[in-house]
Structure formats: C-alpha cells, structure tokens
C-alpha cells in the first residue's frame, strides 16, 4: 500500500531523541530552545514558541489577543474543524466565510460582508500548504482594525509575495502532526513579532506562571501546553532540512501536474505566480459526476491510499445546529469537501510511484 503520507525520520532524529532520553531532562529543554531559535531564523520573526499541538497554538493565540465572549471571528468554511473549535472554546462566535475553488482558502472578496461591530479577528487558513490571498485580507483587517491569526498548520515554508506565511498577522500557528511536512509526533508552533503576545503565550502554556527576577509567580489560570524535549529533538533535524523536503514535494507535484493536467474530469491545483505553495497535500477536484468515495475505495484496492481534503464546517452537526448553517451557505466548501481528493506525497514516493498513481487514477476516472 502506498501511504498518503509518511514522516521522514532520519538517523539524526533517532540519535537526538535518544540523547534526550539518556539525559533524563525531558520537558522544554535544550532542543526546545534550539528549535525555537531555528524557526525564528527561518521565518524571520521575533518570537517562536513551541506548544503541544497546532490546536493549542491556535487556542493560545486567541487567548493572548484577548478574544472571548461577545466577539466574532471570521473563519473559512473549508478547513480542519480545529480552526473554528478554538473560537468556540474561548466563548466567541464562529462566522463562516466560503472559499475559492482555485486556492481552497478563504474567498477574500466575501470577508467585508461578514464583518459586524462585534468582529474581532480573521483566521485565514493556508490550506494544503497554499497561501491565502494575504494582500486583500490584510487590507480588510487594517481597514476594520481586526486581528489576524493565521492557521498555517500545513504551510511552514509557504509564501505570499515572497513573504513567509505565519508572519503577516498578529500570530501565526503551525502544526507538527505526522500528517504535516515535518513532525514531532504531536506539536505546534506560534510565531509573533508582538512582545506582549509572546509573553502571554509563555505564561498560558505553562500553568499561568510568570517569572520576575527569577521568582516564580502564578499570574493567570493557565494550561499545560508545553512540548517535551524529545519531541523537539525528533523534529529539529527535519526542520534543518525543510527546504530539501519541500523541494521533494514540489518535484512530485510537478509530476502529478504533468500527468493529470489534460484530464477534463480532474482539476489540478492552480499555480499562482505570487505564491509559493509547499504542497502539504496534493489536492485535486473531481467533476461532480464522479463518486469520490467510490474512487477512494477503488484506489485502495489498487494499493493507493487517498483521502478527502478537509471538512465543510457549515455541514458539521455542531456548527449547523448552533448557528443554523446549511450546505447552500458555503457551496464551494461543500464542493471541495465532497469532490476533493488528496493524493500521496512525500519522501516515501519516487517519481515512478507518482507516475503509477497518476495513470491508475486516470484509468479509474475515465473508464467508470
Ligand atoms: C492539522 C491542522 C490543525 C490541527 O493541528 P494539530 O497539531 O493536529 O492540533 C489545524 N488546522 C489545520 C488547517 C490543520 O491542517
């Protein structure tokens, strides 16, 4: 079976984890510090803070910016539900906005219509490793004085206009889950250039503890959202070679493009000259007359693991019950959810695998 994704664990990863285990110093140590410094350098940001997962990163960002009951937060309707769940967890209201089918990111032309006097923030998602349209989005945010929290969970290294995603907003959040390009098993990163936000995140990830003159004080009701040092040690060698990992993804994506571009039942990912897509996922859109779920099973029987891309939040029980959303509210999100297909990608594939997957897919799509 060709897996949809597989972590790239080098011998360095294993050696460095072993070193931490032998040292006996397991939580927030040397490798967490090193990892945070490397992310600061890679993204060119003032602060990078490791936390226990990508959802914790999003949750702490909202808390650090003071978003809570009475506030509204704009979220794209097509994403992993964690993006909106954290809005609900801080007691704010999720306002869903549809996506475009070219980038699977928030349709920035629809944002202004969703803004009310209660709107506090926009949370763009850089879906599948493609940057959302950040120029228009930041313009709208500035015009209405809104915070921007970027869900860059799958987009470490992606760029818009030559600038890395996660660095546009008040906070940028990344995930280190095994499904992403680099992984610590579970893990998350928050980046920000705002000293005050960084300070609050440090306090809230560590039980509400603040240090003054080396004296410990409990100044807030915080969480334990820390990362262990062996998780940071597992991921640091991957971070150090992230450009190699991304290049491998770009090469496979180019091969998929070449193989699938003339198949009219399949819409391949759109390339934008002003964005650098890192292909956390190679996600295609199938014609509506193709039964996507049947296709997933057919591919599985041929030894190829594929999956749907993301959820349409407007159709999930929680969001439709609470806010009365229906499928028609965000039709593109629904279309992407029912007709989208993620193909295998990563260091576990060679170019022949990619070509075989493409031709198997074409056969199944054409001769139904
Ligand atoms: C993976 C992902 C998350 C959640 O990250 P975890 O590390 O699994 O908590 C949130 N948003 C998006 C867009 C993701 O892809």
Image (tube, rainbow, N blue to C red):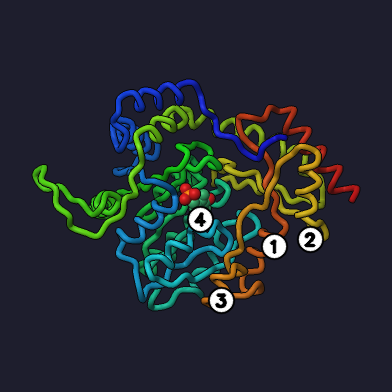
Task: Please report contact status of discs 1 and 2: CB closer than 8 Å, yes or no.
Answer: yes
Marks 1 and 4, how far apart in space? 17 Å
Q: Which residue is mark 2?
A: 288
Q: Earlier in the sequence, mark 4 or mark 3?
A: 4
> Is the CB–ligand 1 distance for label 4 below 8 Å?
yes
Q: In the picture shown, does residue 234 fall above or below 73? A: above
Q: Which residue is mark 1?
A: 335
Q: Which residue is mark 3?
A: 321
Q: Earlier in the sequence, mark 1 or mark 2?
A: 2
Marks 4 and 2, how far apart in space? 25 Å
**Which of the pair 237/277 is nearer the observer?**
237
Q: Which residue is mark 4?
A: 125
- The secondary structure type at the circle numbered 2 is loop
Mark closer to the observer (4, 3) = 3
Q: Residue at x 43, y 59 (%)?
A: 138
Marks 1 and 2, how far apart in space? 8 Å
């Amino acid at each position: 079976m060709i897996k949809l994704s597989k972590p790239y664990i080098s011998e360095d990863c294993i050696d460095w984890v072993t070193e931490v285990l032998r040292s006996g110093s397991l939580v927030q140590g040397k490798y967490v510090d090193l990892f945070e410094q490397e992310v600061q350098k890679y993204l060119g940001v003032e602060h990078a803070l490791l936390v226990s997962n990508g959802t914790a990163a999003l949750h702490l960002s909202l808390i650090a910016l003071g978003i809570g009951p009475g506030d509204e937060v704009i979220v794209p309707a097509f994403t992993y539900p964690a993006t909106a769940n954290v809005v609900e967890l801080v007691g704010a209201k999720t306002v869903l906005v549809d996506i475009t089918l070219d980038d699977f990111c928030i349709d920035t032309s629809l944002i202004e219509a969703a803004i009310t006097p209660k709107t506090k923030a926009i949370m763009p998602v850089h879906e599948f490793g493609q940057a959302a349209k950040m120029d228009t989005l930041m313009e709208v945010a500035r015009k209405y004085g809104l915070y921007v929290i970027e869900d860059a969970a799958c987009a470490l290294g992606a760029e818009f206009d030559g600038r890395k995603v996660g660095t546009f907003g008040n906070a940028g959040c990344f995930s280190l889950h095994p499904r992403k390009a680099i992984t610590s098993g579970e893990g998350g990163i928050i980046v920000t250039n705002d000293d005050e936000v960084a300070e609050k995140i440090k306090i809230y990830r560590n039980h509400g503890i603040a240090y003054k003159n080396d004296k410990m004080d409990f100044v807030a009701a915080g969480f334990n959202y820390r990362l262990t040092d062996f998780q940071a040690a597992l991921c640091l060698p991957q971070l150090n070679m992230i450009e190699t990992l991304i290049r491998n993804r770009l090469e496979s994506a180019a091969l998929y493009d070449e193989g699938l571009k003339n198949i009219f039942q399949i819409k391949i990912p759109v390339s934008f000259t002003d964005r650098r897509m890192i292909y956390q996922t190679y996600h295609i859109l199938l014609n509506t007359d193709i039964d996507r779920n049947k296709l997933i099973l057919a591919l599985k029987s041929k030894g190829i693991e594929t999956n749907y891309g993301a959820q349409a939040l407007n159709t999930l029980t929680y969001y439709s019950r609470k806010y009365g959303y229906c499928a028609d509210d965000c039709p593109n999100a629904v279309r992407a959810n029912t007709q989208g297909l993620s193909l295998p990608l990563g260091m576990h594939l060679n170019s022949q695998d990619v070509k075989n997957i493409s031709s198997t897919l074409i056969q199944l799509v054409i001769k139904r």
